[in-house]
Image: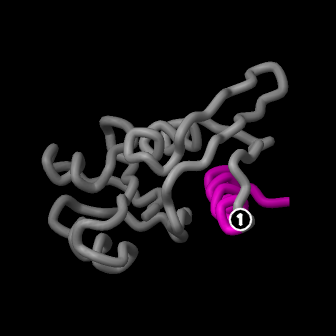
């Protein structure tokens, strides 16, 4: 049994997308996973998600993405090195999103660059 809830949740999303499923139920949830789903919804990778607090699950309706993964190990990123990791994990210049855990919460790599803050790489999708 895995200990990384974020990696498991994103892996379930990716596997459901490859199997041409419309929805997927994630049985283990955490606050960082919910924040990542919020960012994915803003960017269109997830159409909607519904949290069931009694059963501690979340039902996700998949949107438009081809890859989503957690970054392991969680590299520390300074504001100057965001570009280096963007080139490493994303396929093209204006394609995809890196999610960075900062002191202001989870931000996309564009928001972190504008705020001029670094943090810890959490995940990416495109």
- Residue 114 on the magenta segment: no
| Residue 40: image location, x then y, percent | 46, 46
| Residue 79: image location, x then y, percent | 18, 59
Secondary structure mostly seen in the magenta stretch = helix
Q: Is residue 52 above or below residue 74?
A: above
Q: Quarter of the image for the N terminus: give it.
A: bottom right
In-image side of 14 versus 1 (left or right): left
- Which residue lies at the image location 65% right of the left edge and 41% below the top edge? 60
Which residue is disc 1 drawn over?
15
Q: How many marks?
A: 1
- Which residue lies at the image location 39% right of the left edge and 75% below the top edge? 89
- Residue 3 on the magenta segment: yes
Mark 1 element type: helix
In this rendered view, identify the residue nearer to me: 117 or 56.
56
Give the magenta part as a residue range: 1-18
- Which residue lies at the image location 53% right of the left edge and 45% below the top edge? 46
Q: Is residue 86 above or below residue 24?
A: below
- Which residue lies at the image location 55% right of the left edge and 65% below the top edge? 69
In-image side of 75 versus 47 (left or right): left
In this rendered view, identify the residue nearer to me: 81 or 57.
57
In-image side of 7 versus 118 (left or right): right
Question: What colour scheme governs how the chains and residues are painted in the rendered image of this protein?
Answer: one colour
The residue sitting at the top extreme is 54
Q: Residues within 10 Å of mark 1 (few under 14, many from 20)?
A: some
Q: Quarter of the image for the C terminus: give it.
A: bottom left
| Residue 92: image location, x then y, percent | 29, 76
């Amino acid at each position: 049994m895995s200990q990384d809830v974020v990696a498991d949740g994103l892996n379930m999303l990716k596997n459901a997308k490859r199997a041409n499923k419309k929805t997927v139920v994630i049985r283990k949830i955490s606050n960082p996973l919910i924040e990542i789903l919020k960012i994915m919804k803003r960017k269109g990778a997830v159409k909607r998600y519904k949290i069931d607090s009694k059963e501690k699950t979340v039902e996700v309706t998949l949107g438009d993405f081809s890859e989503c993964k957690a970054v392991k190990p969680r590299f520390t990123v300074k504001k100057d090195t965001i570009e280096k990791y963007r080139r490493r994990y994303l396929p093209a210049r204006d394609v995809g999103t890196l999610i960075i855990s900062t002191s202001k919460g989870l931000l996309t790599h564009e928001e972190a660059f504008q705020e001029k803050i670094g943090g810890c790489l959490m995940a990416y999708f495109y």
